[in-house]
Image (cartoon, coloured by chain):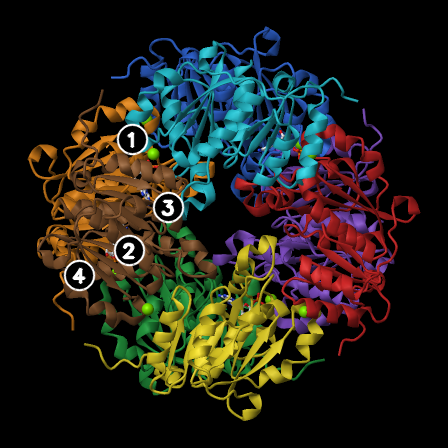
Chain colours: A orange, B cyan, C blue, D red, E purple, F yellow, G green, H brown
Amino acid sequence: EFATLDHHRSLRHRMGEVVYGEGKTAAQCVAIAERLAATGTPVLVTRLDAERSAALRQHFPEGRENRSARTFIANAPAVKGSSSGEPFVAIIAAGTSDLAVAEEAAEVCVASETAFERICDVGVAGLHRLLHKIPEIQQASALVVVAGMEGALPSVVAGLVGRPLFAVPTSVGYGASFGGLAALLAMLNSCAPGVTVANIDNGFSAAYAACNVAHL
Amino acid sequence: EFATLDHHRSLRHRMGEVVYGEGKTAAQCVAIAERLAATGTPVLVTRLDAERSAALRQHFPEGRENRSARTFIANAPAVKGSSSGEPFVAIIAAGTSDLAVAEEAAEVCVASETAFERICDVGVAGLHRLLHKIPEIQQASALVVVAGMEGALPSVVAGLVGRPLFAVPTSVGYGASFGGLAALLAMLNSCAPGVTVANIDNGFSAAYAACNVAHL
Amino acid sequence: EFATLDHHRSLRHRMGEVVYGEGKTAAQCVAIAERLAATGTPVLVTRLDAERSAALRQHFPEGRENRSARTFIANAPAVKGSSSGEPFVAIIAAGTSDLAVAEEAAEVCVASETAFERICDVGVAGLHRLLHKIPEIQQASALVVVAGMEGALPSVVAGLVGRPLFAVPTSVGYGASFGGLAALLAMLNSCAPGVTVANIDNGFSAAYAACNVAHL
Amino acid sequence: EFATLDHHRSLRHRMGEVVYGEGKTAAQCVAIAERLAATGTPVLVTRLDAERSAALRQHFPEGRENRSARTFIANAPAVKGSSSGEPFVAIIAAGTSDLAVAEEAAEVCVASETAFERICDVGVAGLHRLLHKIPEIQQASALVVVAGMEGALPSVVAGLVGRPLFAVPTSVGYGASFGGLAALLAMLNSCAPGVTVANIDNGFSAAYAACNVAHL
Amino acid sequence: EFATLDHHRSLRHRMGEVVYGEGKTAAQCVAIAERLAATGTPVLVTRLDAERSAALRQHFPEGRENRSARTFIANAPAVKGSSSGEPFVAIIAAGTSDLAVAEEAAEVCVASETAFERICDVGVAGLHRLLHKIPEIQQASALVVVAGMEGALPSVVAGLVGRPLFAVPTSVGYGASFGGLAALLAMLNSCAPGVTVANIDNGFSAAYAACNVAHL
Amino acid sequence: EFATLDHHRSLRHRMGEVVYGEGKTAAQCVAIAERLAATGTPVLVTRLDAERSAALRQHFPEGRENRSARTFIANAPAVKGSSSGEPFVAIIAAGTSDLAVAEEAAEVCVASETAFERICDVGVAGLHRLLHKIPEIQQASALVVVAGMEGALPSVVAGLVGRPLFAVPTSVGYGASFGGLAALLAMLNSCAPGVTVANIDNGFSAAYAACNVAHL
Amino acid sequence: EFATLDHHRSLRHRMGEVVYGEGKTAAQCVAIAERLAATGTPVLVTRLDAERSAALRQHFPEGRENRSARTFIANAPAVKGSSSGEPFVAIIAAGTSDLAVAEEAAEVCVASETAFERICDVGVAGLHRLLHKIPEIQQASALVVVAGMEGALPSVVAGLVGRPLFAVPTSVGYGASFGGLAALLAMLNSCAPGVTVANIDNGFSAAYAACNVAHL
Amino acid sequence: EFATLDHHRSLRHRMGEVVYGEGKTAAQCVAIAERLAATGTPVLVTRLDAERSAALRQHFPEGRENRSARTFIANAPAVKGSSSGEPFVAIIAAGTSDLAVAEEAAEVCVASETAFERICDVGVAGLHRLLHKIPEIQQASALVVVAGMEGALPSVVAGLVGRPLFAVPTSVGYGASFGGLAALLAMLNSCAPGVTVANIDNGFSAAYAACNVAHL
Ligand SMILES: Nc1ncnc2c1ncn2[C@@H]1O[C@H](COP(=O)(O)O)[C@@H](O)[C@H]1O
Ligand SMILES: Nc1ncnc2c1ncn2[C@@H]1O[C@H](COP(=O)(O)O)[C@@H](O)[C@H]1O
Ligand SMILES: Nc1ncnc2c1ncn2[C@@H]1O[C@H](COP(=O)(O)O)[C@@H](O)[C@H]1O
Ligand SMILES: Nc1ncnc2c1ncn2[C@@H]1O[C@H](COP(=O)(O)O)[C@@H](O)[C@H]1O
Ligand SMILES: [Mg+2]
Ligand SMILES: [Mg+2]
Ligand SMILES: [Mg+2]
Ligand SMILES: [Mg+2]
Ligand SMILES: [Mg+2]
Ligand SMILES: [Mg+2]
Ligand SMILES: [Mg+2]
Ligand SMILES: [Mg+2]
């Protein structure tokens, strides 16, 4: 046995368990969430379609549903913003179309009781929008930067703010974006040191990393 | 017959002919260049290795050799900068490693008697470097923007300057840049409207387009 | 602050703003368009499905709707052809199936008050069709060349006409066209100098570049 | 046993056997060629480097060596051109850099005693070069069309001449040609019906098909 | 003018015109077919969905509809098999799922008044099925070989029968067939000389080439 | 602790340890091999260049060196063929160029004291060569089938012989073989059930699996 | 004739025939299954949608339907577990979402009268789940290991258990899993020797191989 | 002006500047390093070949050269291990061949005065090696996990230790590893939440991120 492992304790302590909703029936989602929620810890369920989400809402009428993020949280903690005085995660999104991924990231913050702030529609083709937000972004403990198309935002942000930065490419774009591949490759090739990258559209995993850092 | 076509006249008038040096022997390069140069027009030879370049230098001792650009110009016109008062092309390069491609672009300007200015090492991870150059860039008639790695520079420049912009991805970068593919896809997916893209490392073709516009 | 930037003024002066319709609700499209249209400038909305397009039509009964192009223009200027005597953009499409992309390009011309002419169904497998149009094409100030399948049209046109040429690959074709990749690669590898390329199906961006040139 | 098969007899009758030189030692090449040549039929060896080619030349001093094509023919038949009055294959190449592949195709014609004619440097960016050759091409029984970069030549030729046409993409080009992939995909997506395609740089196989047709 | 070109005369003489149905409205399909059919020549329309096909059937009640092939022929000639004594095309398909592509090839034969024979379900994993058919296949003038999955059938057939062979990869297969890419690459890499390849699922083009050869 | 695991015992019992030679210095290779060989068990070292191989030969003058396979075996057991009466592995290779990979597979048999037989140059384009070998192949306990280019051989063999079959694609081929990708995809898409596939050129791993089966 | 081949006899003896349901009509599925089932041997039909499955159920009311696996077995043998005392196959799946592929593998065991055991939800990110099962897995004769996402499970299992192991990548995962490509490549590159790989989602073929081994 | 930005202050404070050595001449490397080193801060130069490294060594005889990592540090701080009592980074490498990338990561720790520990040769195919190291790894503040081939190590480590984990795929592997693509995709698809990924072979960037976290 190797039972003394900490198993993400620092973060899981706050967030409880996570259920990946895709490929499970509504009944399975409810059953698993019920079991995990019994102890009162938050339970985050991700990748939910309308039907599964409704089933959870019916079972946990107090739960927190976010249809844009496609998530549900049972035993949802209160939301905390940057004004809470706690270390917070800045979730920065390039365009309107990247919002769903940013929202998924936000719900991870909620579930793990991490303060966070959203900063949206600050794509690199209109740089002044981003520059006005830099002072705010510099207060954050960790950054989740979400962008589709050419995926340039993380490089620019990392050049301006020295915080741990987790980049998320989105599948937004058409033609030669090839389902997010263009943004993914761009982020992996960032000329700004220290940028690391999550899977396409995986706001969950990048936020998980950022919250982990914010709680250090 | 369809003999009245203009065949790039506006630009070729100035530039004369272009010889693609790769895959030709040194003797062939010299022979072709000699024939084309007979009328006194500039003759640009591109993609030259050391041996072929030396053969041209020996044959055209007055010629203009640029080893970084891997080009040679017989009957080379005088170089004109932005201070010439003529419409000029701005050649903007993200990093030191992109210089060879920028140099190839510069030689196209020389051969076509187009004024031009180089603006280098202004990658997006250190934005202040670029922002200081914006007033100068805004004076240009057309832009060639060269970048490797994540290829983000054209998007940022196009958001700041309303000039025709021709982007050139370079094969600079390692691992998941896949020989310039990352930068190429990024540029094709630019969220800044009007950015169009040349082949990887093809400074020649982008500069050809830019000079064409500068002479309109 | 870096407030003196021109921000695409030459072109935007005429075109006003552009709204990317995809990923926005009908209500958002209408609200954004309404705000931008208030000053009387043209407002182009792209990538509209039937529902969003209908919402705009209802709100702007005078607006210009193009279902093939999937666009809508509020405060639409009058259409100007090559007979207007103004510098014009030639929009050249290889086949019937490329028409939707050519139409999107056309609407950019309308919105930016740029004269334009359509030249369609002139694919390279029946060359006489194209050759008959060359005299007309030579009058244009800039070219948008749209083609799917093997994407050969830009190379042939660029060899015949010395105008700035912006190529648009389309996703038309099946099997090994891989959603437009074949045409995209072909255009990037054009042996005709000065051909630059927009994203797959992105008639918008190529026309934006061409209109920019036509207004120089 | 299924012994009555003809095994490419129509073509092999003339050509004898073919040896793929790559991955064999010089000694193996000589030994195999010697055995096959014993009966006096032509023996074509392909993909030869300088050392292997020299070994064959030394052993078969009467043989036909083509270093550009990287081939050797023992018991080489006389070369026959289109003026021989026999059905002939036209080998059409877009650029100087495609010549090695065209030469390999030519040697297949020699080895199979098929008349042939070379038509070179007729790329689509200078269409008049090709159009002048069309009357000659129309006399051919079958066509091998070789092109790199955007690979557009087969589509244009097939639109002008109704002969069986075998296209060969070459690895000529740089950056986004991806070793011939761009030309390969273009040819597979030809909008001209009846164009079929050989492997990248495989002049051998396309010429084999064309000679097969010429001897029908 | 270059008006003396033959434009595929040998084949078109028999087949009349071909209309690519995809991306055209039912009304357009009917209108174009009607115009072309006026002279009594066969008119083949390909890539038809149910609605467009029904529109043609209603307009040309005597026409020949093949829903599996997704084709329609107005002024359809009589079908001719190998027993007609004329040179014929053998259409060989590996599996049941490749039948639609084989059927499209067959309709090209019908429309061009070319005799043909179908040989199906002879995949390489059960070789005896193919070997029994070899004597019949050897009588053909040209072969169309259709296969999905690993695309091995053309190599095996070309090794047994010395006829011009046109290979068609199909998109049949799952997972790592990547929409026919596996079969396409296999066929392009055939170790049997003279195998040339059409686009994925493009039975039309391969049959066009085969009929062209059969009529030599 | 989970100390009771068998760790490939059945096979390792015979073969001892394996050292992957690539990326290790000659000194490291010798040192590791020496330590492992101390107990007298066979030690197989793979992926050796000339220098490393020579170092091992000098240190283990009794060792078994195979330069084609790029392997070395210290404490090498005697070679056993199919006539040994033991269960044996048949190593089947399509072409001469696949021999190096087949040889690597053979050395795995030697090192693991597994009887084996080589059957080479039986590519699918000349089927009779393979069919003559089928009775011999049917005696084997497991098959390693090595092929490059279109990678069709495993499908054909698996259709004729009901033995566990491990396919190895090789990087042999040019152009669109893309370094063995064509053969890899073909084998993964085999229409013969039960074919499983090793990495490109990985004769080691396929033979390891086959020997494992032969010793059951 | 080469009639003495064994044609997978060892396995087929038990399993009878297999019908690939995709691309066949319900009527065809029933007709083929009926013919094959007449002798009483088990008949496995794979890749069934709801409609085709229902048709089979209606025709063979005693048959065994597995909707998760999308299979049907006529003349289904009794299921045998590891407690049967016979050699058995262990089917190991990483996550809930991989279950459908694991179920297809299970039905192959049923149809071939091979004992088997399922071991599920043992992904590598929670290693203790797998380690608890190792003693059970070590009893198996052959392993089918099914995993999506990063496809790491086969490497870990192969390092712990010395049994023939057949890996199946699944298309589970999103973004950069590219339909199972990530898991496929991971498994092909396994650093554990002897891991061989089936096509994406192809539980059928891997289980076929495993059952073949179990019956040796 | 936006002059108050922190520019990675927390980390740069310690590390000083970084020079990317590739594509710079030896003279340029020395000149840049000299200028940056003047203030006494550490200067890290990466991606050095032997010649450039020697030039630096000659100029900075006190400097720290690491040929395996291909780095040089002028004004190198003392190395600190985990026994220093400071927060440390654990650098975990799967195999011997991944060591160069791990060494580059280590030098980043040195240059930034971050304590670190190396844990090597703990690939997933021999799990006990990793499990013995878990207690040590759990003491680290952040993890850099380096692996080639199937890239499975980060998933397994992340499942055992709840620390911020930065994964680096390496180009180690052959055939279908496609230069590190297999490991890259595996890591991006990790089923362990919070794993983020650096470019192929980019130990620098992952370590930069990890040091950034260690200094929080
Ligand atoms: N959106 C997501 N993306 C990636 N991993 C997730 C996501 N949601 C949940 N997970 C992980 O998936 C696992 C739960 O999977 P399951 O056991 O199938 O519910 C946990 O390890 C989660 O951390
Ligand atoms: N570096 C280059 N990249 C792309 N095209 C070029 C380059 N240099 C020359 N060309 C074009 O290549 C053609 C000359 O090729 P050639 O006849 O082979 O010398 C002309 O159309 C040039 O415009
Ligand atoms: N799910 C499956 N995946 C791959 N091959 C299969 C599958 N099901 C059946 N087969 C094979 O397909 C062949 C039957 O195909 P068919 O003649 O079209 O029914 C047999 O060789 C089977 O072994
Ligand atoms: N090995 C490396 N990989 C990626 N980026 C690096 C590397 N080494 C240095 N850099 C970054 O490259 C920049 C220095 O580039 P340069 O100005 O060309 O020397 C700095 O931002 C460094 O952080
Ligand atoms: Mg916006
Ligand atoms: Mg720099
Ligand atoms: Mg048309
Ligand atoms: Mg030329
Ligand atoms: Mg069948
Ligand atoms: Mg051979
Ligand atoms: Mg689970
Ligand atoms: Mg090791």
The residue pinned by badge 2 equals: H103
Q: Residue furthest bottom?
A: F85
Q: Residues within 10 Å of mark 2 (few under 14, many from 20)?
A: many
In x, y percent, where is residue G40?
52, 81
Q: Split into 4 quadrants, where in the image is the N terminus of chain C?
A: top left
Label 3, label 1: how many angstroms apart (C-alpha)?
A: 26 Å
Label 4, label 1: how many angstroms apart (C-alpha)?
A: 35 Å
Chain bearing mark 1: B
In x, y percent, where is residue F152?
60, 66
The residue pinned by badge 1 equals: B126
The mark lying in front, picked from 2 and 1, is: 2
Residues at marks 4 and 3 on the same chain = yes
Chain bearing mark 4: H
Q: Residue at x 38, y 24 (%)?
A: B157
Residue G18, above or below A6: below
Q: Kindly state the secondary structure of the residue where label 1 is placed.
A: helix
The mark lying in front, picked from 4 and 3, is: 3
Residue B157, above or below F129: above
In x, y percent, where is residue G187?
40, 64
The residue pinned by badge 3 equals: H52
The label on residue H137 is 4
Chain bearing mark 3: H
Q: Amino acid at mark 2?
A: Glu
Label 4, label 2: how many angstroms apart (C-alpha)?
A: 18 Å
- Answer yes or no: disc 2 within 8 Å of ligand 4: no
In x, y percent, where is residue B44?
61, 27
Residue H213, above or below F190: above
